[in-house]
Image: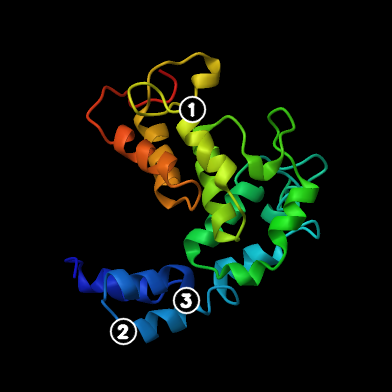
Amino acid sequence: MTETAPAILEWMSRTDPALRWQVERDLLDAPQATWRATRERVATEGMAARLLARQDPEGTWARGAFFPGEGWDPSEATGSGEGQPWVATTWSLSALREWGVDAAVLGDTADRIERAVRWEYDDLPYWGGEVDVCINSWTLSNGLWLGRDMSALAQWFADHQMAEGGWNCEWIEGSTRASVESTLNGLFGCSITSGPPAAPRSCVRRGTAPRSTCWSAGC
């Protein structure tokens, strides 16, 4: 077990179920039955339950893909007129997935999102992704989690990998050098995909080869 101060472990063990089950599994080496029981509570208790309750009838959150949509009232989520972008569909799906919510809880959410929302960039179809590597990695992860066929978006990573093996979210602005952050997200997208097997394996091999990358996406 990772060496962690007992007081910190005790505190983390009393947090929201979305964190608690991961503490039990990864830090406390708890029996599978224990952490699975905690994980089953994630969708009905705490922050995940509150986020699920904020879902729009159309299946989206804040009526937008990456940013809140037109007409969204920030007070719906924050209690004030001041809003921020991290409440829209992509962010909310990613949070629910990473918190361990069972995809079955979301029912036909993926189909409703497909009908209701498109990307702010060029009005592109939601599950087809857009031009940003990091956004596409999250979209790929969320689509697979919800049971979508994401093979077309998986292929996107192979098609847009730079010669040095990485990616840069600023490629659309002319950048020709990979960035560390974009490459890590690209590799994550390749590693989890259930799409065409040759393309993701090739992406991972090229992306992890020792090449020159920069730390900022804008270089």
Mark 1, mark 2: which one is toward the viewer? 1
Q: Secondary structure at mark 1?
A: loop
Indicate the position of residue 116 as horizontal and vertical percent values: 79, 48
Characterize the local packing of mark 2: few (<14), some (14-19) or many (20 or more) Cα atoms within 10 angstroms.
few
Q: Earlier in the sequence, mark 2 or mark 3?
A: 2
User: What residue sits right under mark 3 in the picture?
Assistant: 39
The label shown at residue 160 is: 1
As measured in the structure, the alpha-carbon distance from the residue carrying label 3 to the one carrying label 1 is 36 Å
Question: Quick one: 103 or 50, which is closer to the camera?
Answer: 103
Numbered circle sitting on residue 31: 2
Which quadrant of the structure image shows residue 76?
A: bottom right
Using the image, tell me which numbered label, if any, was put on residue 215: none
Q: Nearer the viewer, residue 188 or 120?
A: 188
The secondary structure type at the circle numbered 2 is: loop
Q: CA distance from mark 2 to mark 3?
A: 13 Å
Instruction: Choose the circle earlier in sequence order: 1 or 2.
Output: 2
- Residue 99 in the figure: left or right of residue 9: right
- At x 50%, y 22%, the residue is 170
Nearer to us in this view, 69 or 179: 179
The answer to whether mark 2 and mark 3 are in CB contact below 8 A is no
At x 34% / y 71%, what residue is drawn?
Answer: 23
On screen, residue 19 versus residue 115, left or right, reads left
Decide if residue 186 is on the left or right side of residue 131.
Answer: left
Q: Label 3 neighbourhood size at 10 Å, few (<14), some (14-19), many (20+)?
A: many
Which of the image's four quarters has the N terminus?
bottom left
Disc 1 residue crowd, few under 14, some 14–19, many 20+, Cα 10 Å: some
Foreground tag (3 vs 1): 1
